[in-house]
Structure formats: structure tokens, C-alpha cells
Amino acid sequence: MNDRFVIPGILPPLYRREPDGRLVEVAPAMPCPDLLTEEEAIRYLRLDLIDVESPEDTLRRYRRQGLVRGTQVGRCVRYRRSELERFLERITENNPR
């Protein structure tokens, strides 16, 4: 699994962590749409790969804190890819490693 680098315009594969700790790919990499669902935003930010209890709650907390802006479409919140890219740029500038 050496695809940990973000490739612009590509939504990374989706992984599930097995009880024994292994990561199993459950969805392949694919072109990334400009408007992402919550699940796609989680994949794009790779929140599904870090050890957080609930990636969904983490993304919602980012939104409540004003770190990421969502867009209401019908009854669902969607995330513009450009907004997620700006978020990544901001946190990288504030916390370079």
C-alpha cells in the first residue's frame, strides 16, 4: 500500500481495518468528483486510515469548528474538492513536518 500520497483529481482507495489490524481494500482508486459525499471526503482526507474512532465525527467536528466548509445539497452536506484542498494547505502551513 504505497498510495498514501494524494494525487490531485484521484479519490484514493477505500480500506477497512480487519480485527487483526490488517487493512483490506474495499473500493479502488477512482477519479475524484468536484462535489464529494461525506464518505468520499473522508477517503480524500484519508481519515479512514488513521486511528480515529469515528472518521464521520471527525469530519463533522472540522466543519463545526469552521476548518472545512460543507455545502447543503438537498438534505445532504457535500464537500467541494477545492475546499478540502484548501483545508489541507492550511493545516500543512500551520503544522509543517
Image (cartoon, grey):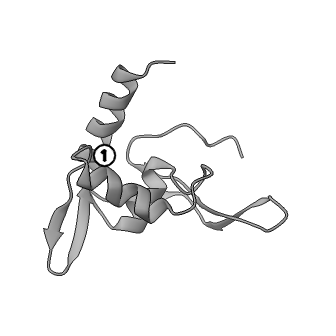
Q: Where is residue 39 shown, x and y percent of the image?
A: 42, 67
Residue 88 relative to residue 12: left or right: left
Q: Is residue 32 visible?
A: no
User: Residue 80 is drawn in which quadrant?
Assistant: bottom left
The number of discs equals 1
Decide which of 88, 10 is in the foreground and name it: 88
In the rendered view, tell whether residue 27 sits above or below residue 21.
below
Q: Residue at x 52, y 63 (%)?
A: 54
Kindly identify which residue carries mark 1: 84
User: Residue 73 is drawn in which quadrant?
Assistant: bottom left
Q: Where is residue 48 shown, x and y percent of the image?
A: 55, 57
Residue 52 relative to residue 88: left or right: right
Q: Where is residue 3 shown, x and y percent of the image?
A: 62, 43
SS label for mark 1: helix
Decide which of 47, 43 is in the foreground and name it: 47
Q: Can residue 3 be seen in this view?
A: yes
User: Residue 22 is drawn in which quadrant?
Assistant: bottom right
Q: Residue at x 21, y 58 (%)?
A: 70
> Which residue extends farthest bottom?
75
Q: Which amino acid does label 1 sit on?
A: Leu
Residue 77 relative to residue 16: left or right: left
Q: Residue at x 26, y 43 (%)?
A: 67
Q: Where is residue 74 shown, x and y percent of the image?
A: 14, 80
Mark 1 residue crowding within 10 angstroms, few (<14) / some (14–19) / many (20+): some
Q: Residue at x 72, y 46 (%)?
A: 1
